Structure formats: structure tokens, C-alpha cells
Image: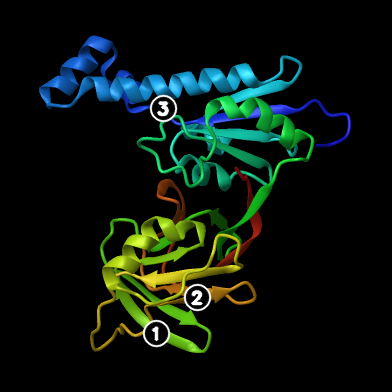
């Protein structure tokens, strides 16, 4: 913390399924009818909502009254102004932390798991009652933290996008993506379902399913390694395109280079397709470890 500054705690959260359904159907009665008509367990949906609401209330109560505070929903993150000395508390599933990471610049993140029976808790490691002690440890610089590598894509026109788990490069309609792929001294023209470039943090998500399905032996980086791994999805071998350059590691001093041979290309991170870079024919994108890191408070 900056000397003399009044701490600010920002609580970030994603609306529950119950809240999203209320937004769509207006009343609790209509939501219950909608769920019951589709043989969904209403109590399961409301129980998960109640657990998150209780966690949010506990976190809010843990913030000292003399400190500043703010709340931000996931869908408002892109327009929210984080301050350099913020302490950020992410309440929800593990995916809430990657959703936050791209908007931060080393502010510490405390992940709170409101439902350990349903959420793995790889990134949201704390129970809500722990927050009262943890936020003081963070402000007083006593908390242990992990510096997690992020991945960046940089276009030749200066646009840039970062992600904590992975970046996707492909066609916005998910039809075949066409491009020239360069990794070190190897170059190949490809037609595929797109490219995934993942950090060590992302190795437990989308990348894990790719590695498992193709039985890859590539040694994935750890969350703090200054490396990212790339995987080409369903490369199509033809007279004009190859399928030999489909996975590998990218070091901090190098980059994976993709030259688009399509209109309608996109680059997006951590599954958020609305926040993306447009990739037109001939554009050059370079992908590798980002200079920023996520500062995750350790349990």
C-alpha cells in the first residue's frame, strides 16, 4: 500500500443463475415456472444463489468501516476504473479470477469460494470468513502471493489483448481459420479450427481437455513459468495446408507469429468473445508471455 493511503477493497462477482433468470423473467414465480417446466431443480439453483449472497455479505462485513469499498459485476469490468492500490476480492467460481486479471496491473486478488462442494477452488481458495484477516495481511504486506504468468497477443496495428488462462485465435463464426503459423524457424500454412495459446494457469482448463483428447506428451508450463503452450485445433492437411506444426512451447524471449489469411478473424481471451480483437486478411499477430502478472493471494 502507498503510505498514508486509505485502503480500498473492490469486491467482484458474477450474477448467479438465479439472478440472470430474474433479469430475463422479471419475477421469482416466473423463474420457478420456467425451471420446473424444464425439470430443473429449483432448490439447487436457489441454494447456489443463497450461498453466494451470504459470501458477499460476509466479505462486505469484513471490510473496516474506515476503508473505502466498491463492488463490480463481471459484465461491468471493462468500464470499471481500478486504482493502483486496490485490494480485489473475487467471489464465485474459479473463472471469476481470469475474468478480472486482464483489467488489473498487479493489484492483489483474493479468491473466495462460496460453494466448495461445487467449485474446485484452484484460484478461489478462501472461505468468506477468512477475508477479515486476509485483507489486513494484504494491506500490511504480510500475505503470501503467487505471480502467475499471463499471455498476450499484439497486433501489427498496436492493438493488444492479455489473458490469464488462454487466448484463442480463429474465425469469429468458428468456420475454418486460415493463416500462416510461425514458431521459431518452422513455418506452416494451415486451415484449422483455431489456435489455443495457454499459460500454466490455463493448463487446468481448456488446454487440459485438448491434451487429454490428443494424448499429448508436451510438458506444460507451471503457473509461474515464463512460457506458454500452443495447440492447433483440428489442423487440416491438404495440398495447400499442413498439419505438422500443431503444438509447442513459446518462451518469454520469442513469440508465436500468426499471419491471417482470412477476413472475420478474432483473438479473444478466457472465453470472453465480446471483448476481442478483430483480425483481418494480412494482419500479423504475435503471441507470447505477457509482461504483466496476476498477483494471486495464496492460502
Mark 2 or mark 3, which has the lower sequence index? 3
Mark identifier at residue 104: none
- Upstream in sequence: badge 2 or badge 1: 1
The residue singled out by tag 1 in the image is 188
Q: Tell me the residue at 47%/63% (across/down).
A: 198
Q: Is residue 192 above or below residue 109?
A: below
- Where does the image place residue 234, in percent across and percent down from the top left? 27, 72
Q: Residue at x 41, y 63 (%)?
A: 169
- Residue 2 falls left or right of residue 70: right
Q: Is residue 48 above or below residue 84?
A: above
Q: Which residue is mark 2?
A: 249
Q: Which dot marks residue 15?
A: 3
Q: In the image, residue 132 lies at what x, y percent?
A: 65, 25
Q: Quadrant of residue 29?
A: top left
Q: Is residue 134 above or below residue 144?
A: above
Q: Residues within 10 Å of mark 2 (few under 14, many from 20)?
A: many
* Count of marks placed on residues: 3
Amino acid at each position: 500500500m502507498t503510505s498514508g493511503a486509505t485502503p480500498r477493497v473492490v469486491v467482484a462477482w458474477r450474477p448467479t443463475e438465479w439472478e440472470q433468470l430474474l433479469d430475463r423473467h422479471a419475477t421469482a414465480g416466473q423463474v420457478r415456472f420456467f425451471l420446473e417446466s424444464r425439470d430443473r431443480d429449483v432448490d439447487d439453483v436457489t441454494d447456489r444463489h443463497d450461498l453466494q449472497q451470504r459470501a458477499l455479505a460476509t466479505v462486505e462485513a469484513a471490510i473496516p468501516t474506515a476503508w473505502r469499498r466498491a463492488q463490480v459485476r463481471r459484465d461491468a469490468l471493462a468500464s470499471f476504473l481500478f486504482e493502483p492500490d486496490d485490494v480485489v476480492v473475487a467471489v464465485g467460481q474459479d473463472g471469476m479470477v481470469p475474468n478480472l486479471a486482464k483489467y488489473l496491473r498487479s493489484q492483489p486478488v483474493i479468491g473466495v469460494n462460496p460453494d466448495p462442494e461445487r467449485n474446485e477452488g484452484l484460484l478461489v481458495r478462501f472461505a468468506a470468513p477468512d477475508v477479515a484477516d486476509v485483507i489486513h495481511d494484504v494491506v500490511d504486506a504480510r500475505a503470501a502471493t503467487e505471480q502467475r504468468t499471463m499471455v498476450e497477443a499484439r497486433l501489427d496495428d498496436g492493438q493488444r489483448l492479455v489473458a490469464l488462462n488462454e487466448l484463442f485465435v480463429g474465425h469469429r463464426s468458428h468456420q475454418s481459420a486460415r493463416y500462416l503459423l510461425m514458431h521459431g524457424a518452422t513455418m506452416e500454412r494451415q486451415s484449422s479450427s483455431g489456435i489455443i495459446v495457454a499459460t500454466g494457469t490455463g493448463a487446468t482448463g481448456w488446454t487440459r481437455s485438448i491434451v487429454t483428447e490428443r494424448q499429448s506428451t508436451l510438458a506444460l508450463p507451471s503457473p509461474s513459468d515464463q512460457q506458454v503452450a500452443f495447440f492447433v485445433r483440428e489442423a487440416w492437411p491438404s495440398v495447400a495446408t499442413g498439419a505438422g506444426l500443431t503444438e509447442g512451447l513459446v518462451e518469454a524471449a520469442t513469440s508465436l507469429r500468426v499471419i491471417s489469411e482470412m477476413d472475420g478473424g478474432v483473438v479473444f481471451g478466457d472465453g470472453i468473445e465480446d471483448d476481442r480483437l478483430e483480425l483481418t486478411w494480412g494482419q500479423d499477430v504475435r503471441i507470447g508471455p505477457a509482461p504483466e502478472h496476476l498477483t494471486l493471494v495464496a492460502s
